[in-house]
Image (spheres, rainbow, N blue to C red):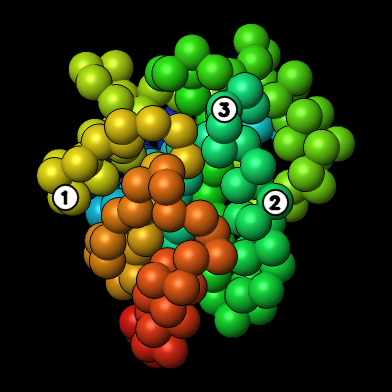
Amino acid sequence: MRATLTLRYIVAPLAMVGLWGFANPAAHAADAPAAASAAACPATLQHTYLRLQDERPQSLCQYAGKVVLVVNTASYCGFTGQYKGLEELYSRYKDKGLVVLGFPSNDFAQEKSSNKEIADFCENTFGVKFPMFAKTAVRGADASPLYKQLAQLSGTAPKWNFHKYLLGRDGRLVDNYSSMTAPDSKSLVRAIEQQLAVAAPR
């Protein structure tokens, strides 16, 4: 079965580019939805990260068209209680198009050692249901590509845990908020509601 799958993924691209001396219309047709999907995914979401719970790769493109709140989290921080507010925010607005993306980080030496420990803590302590990803760096030379991109766009890298970046439905950065901005902050909630009122791009 493994050999069959390997051959399939080698043969299809060769046929598409005509290296066998003929075009493959079926291959082009099959590839069209993928190409369209990539084109519809904004640059800020063209990243893949391991999911926290099982460390399986997840493309952020699945959140294209949504209002996205990106947050770097930690388990041993004075702001860790914001998990509760973030989950309430997600639960309140997810059906309207909001998604909260949590990125645990030990950049400030306040995170647990393993992804499993972090996942258990988030679920058991705060009932977190919003998407969480494997522990990653969020600032400096080792920052993940997403966080490097967000720092460049905003001019601000996270200065502490629970820094927040808000992206509109088109994937563009709307604003960023320090750790001091709670999830139920009027300014943050107002900005989220304004972005949710914008129609998703087609």
- The disc placed on residue 84 is 2
Q: Is residue 150 visible?
A: yes
User: Could you say where residue 163 lies in the image, as x and y percent from the top left?
Assistant: 40, 43
Q: Is residue 12 visible?
A: no
Disc nearer the start of the sequence (1/2) = 2
Asked if the residues shown at circle 1 and circle 2 are in contact, with their CB atoms under 8 angstroms apart, the answer is no
Residue holding disc 3: 77
Callout 2: SS: helix
Q: Is residue 182 above or below residue 198?
A: above
Q: Amino acid at mark 3?
A: Cys
Residue holding disc 1: 153
User: Could you say where residue 105 lies in the image, as x and y percent from the top left?
Assistant: 49, 25
Residue at point 69%, 63% (across, down) = 88
Residue at point 64%, 27% (across, down) = 75
Residue at point 34%, 53% (across, down) = 177
Q: Nearer the viewer, residue 200 or 166?
A: 166
Q: Amino acid at mark 2?
A: Lys
Residues at marks 3 and 2, CA–CA distance in whole angstroms: 13 Å
Label 2: few (<14), some (14–19) or many (≥20) C-alpha neighbours in 10 Å = some
Disc nearer the start of the sequence (1/3) = 3
- In the image, which is nearer the foreground, mark 1 or mark 2? 2
Q: Is residue 143 above or below residue 15?
A: above
Q: Is residue 47 above or below residue 39?
A: above
**Quadrant where the image shows the N terminus:** top right
Label 1: few (<14), some (14–19) or many (≥20) C-alpha neighbours in 10 Å = some
Callout 3: SS: loop
**Quadrant where the image shows the C terminus:** bottom left
User: Could you say where residue 68 lies in the image, as x and y percent from the top left?
Assistant: 45, 61
